[in-house]
Image (spheres, rainbow, N blue to C red):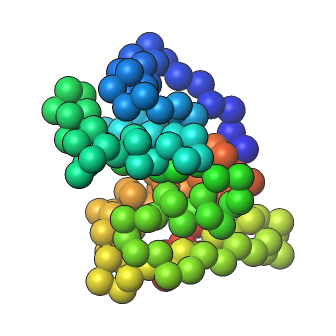
């Protein structure tokens, strides 16, 4: 697992997020097109808000898309949570011959392209987010 460090801007985002949602943020990853927040297990509904009101308000305030993930100690569940908006069918985790721990996420075939993202951008960000919390070095979408 990677060490999680925040810069001043990320700390401001986390503070604003926690104030608006009354939830506990475990992690925040700032990427050029989106902010990814990992919230404490059990806080996801509160973080999103009724009908997504918190997400909409945060998007306006921070001027970025918002992706909220519910933390879980179980690696498979956490990976599924990261890819939740792409209708996860299953998650397989294996240790390959070279010792690399790899997760294969099977999603709705119609959403596979979006899960991977333009030039693999989503997949790279999701892999980094997962690696910050679990000993998984590579991720693929099936």
Q: Choose between 39 and 137: the one closer to the eye.
A: 39
Outermost residue on the bottom side: it is 109
Measured from the top left, where is residue 75 in percent x and y?
A: 69, 60
Q: Which residue is at the front of the view, 39 or 128?
A: 39
Horizontal placement of 108 versus 130: left or right? left
Q: Which residue appears at 23% of the width and 51% of the height?
A: 51
Residue 36 visible to an observer of this rendering? no
> Residue 108's x, y, as percent?
38, 82
- Residue at x 43% of width, y 65% of height: 84
Which quadrant is home to the N terminus? top right
Q: Is 7 above or below relative to 130?
A: above
Q: In this view, does 31 lie above or below 80?
A: above
Q: Image point 65% across, 67% down: which residue? A: 76
Task: Out of 18 and 112, give the one closest to the viewer.
Answer: 18
Q: Is residue 139 visible?
A: yes
In percent of width and height, residue 133 lies at 66, 46
* Residue at (62% x, 64% y) in the render: 77
């Amino acid at each position: 697992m990677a060490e999680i460090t925040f810069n001043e801007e990320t700390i401001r985002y986390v503070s604003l997020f926690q104030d608006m949602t009354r939830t506990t943020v475990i992690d925040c990853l700032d990427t050029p097109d989106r902010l990814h927040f990992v919230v404490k297990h059990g806080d996801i509904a509160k973080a999103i808000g009724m009908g997504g009101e918190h997400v909409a308000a945060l998007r306006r305030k921070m001027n970025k898309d918002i992706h909220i993930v519910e933390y879980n100690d179980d690696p498979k569940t956490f990976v599924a949570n990261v890819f939740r908006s792409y209708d996860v069918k299953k998650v397989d985790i294996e240790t390959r011959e070279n010792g690399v721990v790899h997760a294969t996420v099977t999603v709705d075939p119609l959403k596979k392209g979006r899960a991977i993202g333009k030039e693999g951008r989503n997949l790279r960000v999701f892999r980094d987010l997962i690696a910050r919390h679990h000993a998984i070095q590579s991720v693929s979408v099936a």
